[in-house]
Amino acid sequence: MHSKKSSQSTGSDGNGLEPEVGAGEAVEESGAGAKRILIRIPARHNPRLQQIIDRINGDDELYTLWQVMNVNAVQRLGMSDHGPVHFQIVANIALRLLRLLVEHNVQPSVSTDHHLPVEDAEVIVAMASLFHDLGMSIHRADHELYSLFLAAPKMKKLLDGIYDIPTRTIIISEILHAIISHRADGGPLTLEAGIVRVADALDMAEGRSRIPFQAGMVNIHSVSASAIEKIKIEKGELKPIRIAILMNNSAGIFQIDELLKNKLEGSGLEPYVEVEATIEGETEKKLIHKFHI
């Protein structure tokens, strides 16, 4: 049994999301004083999404899977965080991207193809964001495929009674498509899948993708990740979405070019997104003092 806390977050714009990307997680006591991170997203205008998030926050099996995933990712593989903080950030980014696009009259695929409302597209991007790496609990290799068979029965339970069977079937299919499409050669066929793909790559701000670097792993991946300070997602001037990336060192360009660019290309979001990267201050932060081969 877990204490109840609101899983809604509030923001400073019409999307209910802060332009600057960050964690902002809620924490509750769980069992013997253990800390449990609650998922918080701005769902106050989408009652179904809020109901689903409340169910997710009460699901012990899902939370344990997230913890197992992080053991594999961080402790065993020396990777960045792949736990509930990562999923909350990705879900919030995905919702922000979707809402900015809808503001500019870009309709989600589930609306154009299945005639479901935008609120159901929000459910799709949020749940895909929260479930996209479940397969990491099994193995990093092919984790996108493993995520599918772990996510499908769990989503069926979480959506039970919220949707009728035909609508639930459509939504689960769209979520699974978004999950498999976040892999390197995913080839997303829907706007929602493209959004999740890009949102996953945008979890690179300070303190997020730096775990390997802080643990002493020095390579271009860890150093470039450590160079990313802040990310802001705003209304664009030339396109609906502007992604502003603030760096402390030009090494961050590698992270943007190798990770974000690869996820953006082929996502379907290319016509709608402009990316700008800048270095804060007049001098760059010194990230490496000495390097040995």
Image: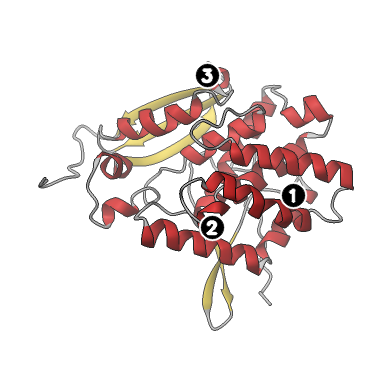
Figure check: 28 above or below 201: below
Q: Nearer the viewer, residue 8 or 85?
A: 85
Question: Which label lies toward us, 3 or 1?
Answer: 1
Query: Residue at image x 58%, y 50%?
Result: 146
Secondary element type, mark 1: helix
Kindly identify which residue carries mark 1: 49
- The residue under label 2 is 84
Q: Earlier in the sequence, mark 3 or mark 1?
A: 1
Task: Please name the residue shown 77% across and 41% down the image.
Answer: 171
Q: Can residue 14 be seen at all in this image of the molecule?
A: no
Residue 107 is situated, as x and y percent measured from the top left of the image, at: 72, 25
Identity of the residue drawn at 67% across and 22% down: 104
**47 relative to 125, above or below:** below
Q: Position of residue 27 (x, y in %)?
A: 55, 67
Q: Are marks 3 and 2 in contact (CB under 8 Å)?
A: no
Report the coloring of the rendering: secondary structure
